[in-house]
Image (cartoon, rainbow, N blue to C red):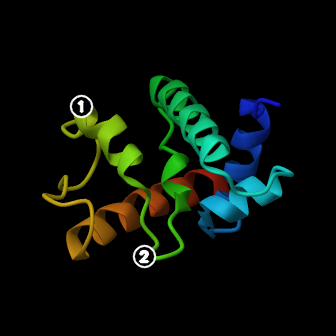
Amino acid sequence: MPLDPAEIRELLIGAARQRTPLTYSQALFALGHSFTRPLMRQLCAAMDRIDEEGRLAGEPGLAVLVVRQSDGLPGQGWWVSRSHLADEMPGEWPLDWEGAEAKAYVALHQFLAFERWSAG
């Protein structure tokens, strides 16, 4: 059963309102599924579409709120799917997708999402 992008968007907006990132497993569980690689790929593809639609509407990204449990950062796919937008996204695009620069970049974009949706 395919994941519902509208339900995913609402889940992410709820996380933004609570100012709390979710792990990939937590996001899938909240959507009524156990973690599997195929479902994670579906989730990521849906989040990319959600973020692209949001970007065109002038909204900050939401997919940045879904992170790996191991280090609190989005997976490689998040970085790759947004690399062409690096010049348009606030903050200094990190040289590496892990480490202090990546954490600062993700924290900035999570903050932007928190501020947008916490305000109503």
Q: Residues within 10 Å of mark 2 (few under 14, many from 20)?
A: few
Whether residue 16 sits left or right of residue 54 in the image: it is right
116 vs 11, nearest the viewer: 11
8 vs 36, nearest the viewer: 36
Q: Secondary structure at mark 1?
A: helix
Check the image and report above or below for 118 versus 84. below
Whether residue 74 sits left or right of residue 99 in the image: it is right
Q: What's the mark number on residue 70?
A: none
Check the image and report above or below for 110 versus 90. below
The residue carrying mark 1 is 84
Q: Which amino acid type corresponds to the residue marked 1 in the rendered image?
A: His
The residue shown at (42%, 55%) is 75
Q: Residues within 10 Å of mark 1 (few under 14, many from 20)?
A: few
x and y percentages locating residue 63 in the rendered image = 53, 47
Distance from Cα at disc 1 to Cα at disc 2: 24 Å
The residue carrying mark 2 is 71
Q: Are marks 1 and 2 in contact (CB under 8 Å)?
A: no
The residue shown at (79%, 59%) is 29
Q: Quadrant of residue 5?
A: top right
Going from N to C along the chain, the mark reached first, 1 or 2, is 2
